[in-house]
Amino acid sequence: MLMWDEDTKNIQRSLFKDTLVQAFNTIYGTDENDLASWQNLCSILHIAPMPEGLTACREAVAETNVNLVDLVDLPNSNNPVTTFPTEVALSEYTLGSGKIFPRENAYAGGLLKYLLRHIMNPRTPRAKPRVRTRRRGRR
């Protein structure tokens, strides 16, 4: 059985994380001004109707919660991509499966940044703020 010391484990873990990020960039692109890349990503994420412009694509992708390891593995697995209704649900799946994508990486491209989430400390959905109106005659 091969036994690695702690330094070797850390180096291998770092190389694996770099490889995951670079694989995402190769498969889905890095140019955040390339509409074709955005629409390809929207198609894979089953975003319908298909957004027509860059801004609409970016917003749609930014609102989608998907496990990035599954997304990188998609060309190999052919499993359908699962999206999650909240960051909390995505976090539960990710931590339970151990499929944790590196959040901070020097190779993170433009498209990838729109899909990164807070897996360790997910944000809970907030209720929409109530609009307060001021009644006339009262101070």
Image: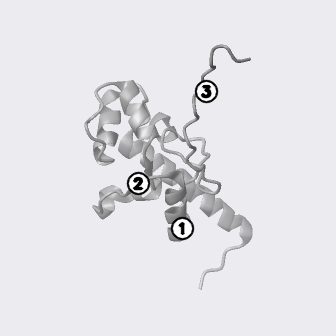
- In the displayed structure, 19 sits above or below 126; it is below
Q: Is residue 127 left or right of residue 69?
A: right
Q: Position of residue 25 (x, y in %)?
A: 44, 42
Closer to the camera: disc 2 or disc 1?
Answer: 1
Q: Is residue 115 left or right of residue 3?
A: left
Residue that label 3 marks = 132
Q: Which mark is residue 98?
A: 1
Foreground: 132 or 39? 132
Amino acid carrying mark 2 in the image:
Val
* Coloring applied to the structure: one colour
The residue located at (36%, 32%) in the rendering is 57
The residue located at (61%, 81%) in the rendering is 2
Q: Position of residue 112 (x, y in %)?
A: 48, 41
Dividing the picture into quadrants, the one containing residue 56 is top left
Check the picture and name the quadrant holding the N terminus. bottom right
Amino acid carrying mark 3 in the image:
Arg
Estimate the spatial distance between the alpha carbons at disc 2 and disc 3, rounded to whole Å: 45 Å
Residue that label 2 marks = 72
Q: Which mark is residue 41?
A: none
Q: Residues within 10 Å of mark 2 (few under 14, many from 20)?
A: many
Amino acid carrying mark 1 in the image:
Gly
Of the two numbered discs 2 and 3 on the same chain, state the one appearing first in sequence: 2
Element under label 1? loop
The residue located at (40%, 54%) in the rendering is 72
